[in-house]
């Protein structure tokens, strides 16, 4: 018996192509003296159905069935029935999932000391990580005090005494002498840095700052990103692509020949695959917590669905440049912030991915502002709790 599939996914793609509603997202705002950071994240969950039509060897329809399509790429389609008769019974429609009830506002609790964070499941092999994709473990770091002032060289050095076993460390910008301070704090190690040009209006200046910090030794640089979630925040994709080209030329003039990319959310990258195509690999921020329908122990599965989908759509390697789970905050559906769930999410992510994942983040970001839009969890994503320099 032959089987034909008529997919309703085109309706979902039309939905993704339309302007997205306002949703929470991480925002690393430009620093111009002390600032407050407002944080929002855009995630979209797409559900649609496929209609399956069974036909006999002469092409005549004999039965139909519906199957649910989830946001992650589907697995193989169901096997066709062995004979044209009797016709199979249609599958019952999927039952709607119960909507989460509003959660009461929790009373402020003292910040508990987190359990000792394990090192990455995929520790450094002892040699330097390759440039671009292929590193075994990574983590992000920001050099700001709780009052939004820059950490000193000594404070950064103190923080890095606890960041051990990672191949790659992500920095978001060039302010606060963070590139020079981070390189100095890890001198003599095999750690490489995923550096960032944050301000699209200052591409040349930030490229110069990076060049001055590395002093001609680009062996410590894994990749350079241009912007962080810029399209997700409303910047035109063409502007970002132009900035990628400008950064690539400026860095090449300084002797750098490694990967240059832009970083955005998995939704923005799905809607605008040209961002991946303009980059040397596809770099996405992907947090299962903001989905609201994914528990901590399923984080790895959630992220892998998006990685596989984007890899298939763009033909490029996908690197996850942010992912994690908060230890404190308000529930988001079935996603509940807690130390226990943080550990469950880390186990799931590290058990799913052997490489190309940067965890978010090394320490709590007390310089950020908690809001209802990010479930009052924005400060509490640190793998090792508060920074030792705090």
Image: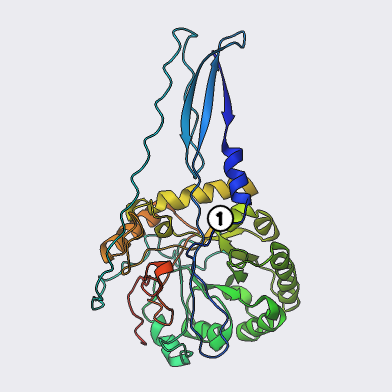
Residue 177: x, y in percent? 55, 88
The residue drawn where x is 52% and y is 68% is 128
Q: Quadrant of residue 323?
A: bottom left
The residue drawn where x is 69% and y is 73% is 256
Residue 16: x, y in percent? 59, 50
On screen, 390 above or below 308?
below
Residue 231: x, y in percent? 62, 64
| Whether residue 134 can be seen here | no
Disc 1 packing (10 Å; few <14; some 14–19; many ≥20): many
The residue drawn where x is 42% and y is 71% is 361
Q: Quadrant of residue 288?
A: bottom left
Q: Nearer the viewer, residue 213 or 369?
A: 369
Task: Determine whether the residue tagged by mark 1 lies in a helix, strand or loop.
Answer: helix
Q: Nearer the viewer, residue 351 or 387?
A: 387
For the C terminus, give its image quadrant: bottom left
For the N terminus, give its image quadrant: top right
On screen, 368 above or below 147?
above
| Whether residue 286 can be seen here | yes
The residue drawn where x is 46% and y is 76% is 141
The residue carrying mark 1 is: 267
**Count of numbered badges drawn on the protein:** 1
């Amino acid at each position: 018996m032959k089987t034909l599939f008529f997919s309703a996914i085109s309706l979902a793609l039309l939905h993704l192509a339309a302007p997205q509603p306002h949703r929470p997202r991480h925002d690393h705002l430009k620093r111009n003296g002390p600032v407050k950071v407002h944080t929002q994240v855009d995630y979209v969950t797409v559900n649609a159905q496929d209609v399956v039509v069974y036909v006999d060897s002469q092409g005549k329809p004999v039965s139909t069935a519906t199957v649910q399509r989830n946001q992650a790429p589907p697995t193989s389609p169901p096997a066709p029935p062995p004979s044209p008769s009797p016709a199979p019974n249609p599958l019952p429609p999927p039952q709607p999932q119960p909507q989460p009830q509003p959660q009461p506002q929790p009373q402020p609790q003292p910040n508990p000391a987190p359990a000792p964070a394990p090192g990455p499941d995929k520790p450094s092999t002892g040699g330097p990580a390759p440039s671009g994709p292929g590193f075994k473990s990574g983590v992000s770091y920001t050099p700001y005090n709780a009052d939004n002032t820059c950490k000193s060289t000594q404070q950064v050095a103190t923080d890095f005494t606890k960041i051990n076993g990672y191949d790659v460390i992500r920095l978001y910008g060039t302010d606060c002498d963070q590139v020079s301070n981070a390189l100095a704090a890890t001198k003599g190690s095999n750690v490489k840095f995923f550096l960032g040009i944050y301000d699209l209006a200052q591409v040349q200046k930030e490229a110069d700052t990076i060049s001055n910090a590395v002093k001609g030794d680009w062996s410590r640089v894994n990749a350079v990103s241009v912007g962080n979630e810029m399209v997700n925040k409303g910047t035109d994709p063409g502007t970002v692509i132009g900035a990628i080209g400008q950064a690539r030329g400026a860095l090449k003039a300084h002797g750098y020949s490694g990967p240059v990319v832009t970083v955005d959310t998995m939704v923005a990258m799905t809607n605008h695959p040209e961002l991946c195509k303009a980059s040397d690999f596809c770099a996405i921020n992907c947090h299962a917590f903001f989905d609201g329908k994914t528990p901590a122990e399923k984080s790895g599965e959630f992220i892998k669905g998006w990685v596989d989908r984007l890899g298939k759509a763009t033909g490029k390697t996908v690197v996850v440049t942010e992912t994690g789970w908060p230890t404190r905050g308000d529930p988001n559906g079935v996603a509940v912030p807690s130390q226990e769930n943080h550990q469950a999410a880390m186990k799931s992510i590290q058990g799913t991915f052997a490489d190309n994942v940067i965890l978010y983040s090394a320490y709590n970001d007390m310089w950020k502002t908690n809001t209802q839009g990010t479930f009052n969890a924005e400060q509490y994503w640190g793998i090792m709790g508060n920074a030792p320099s705090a």
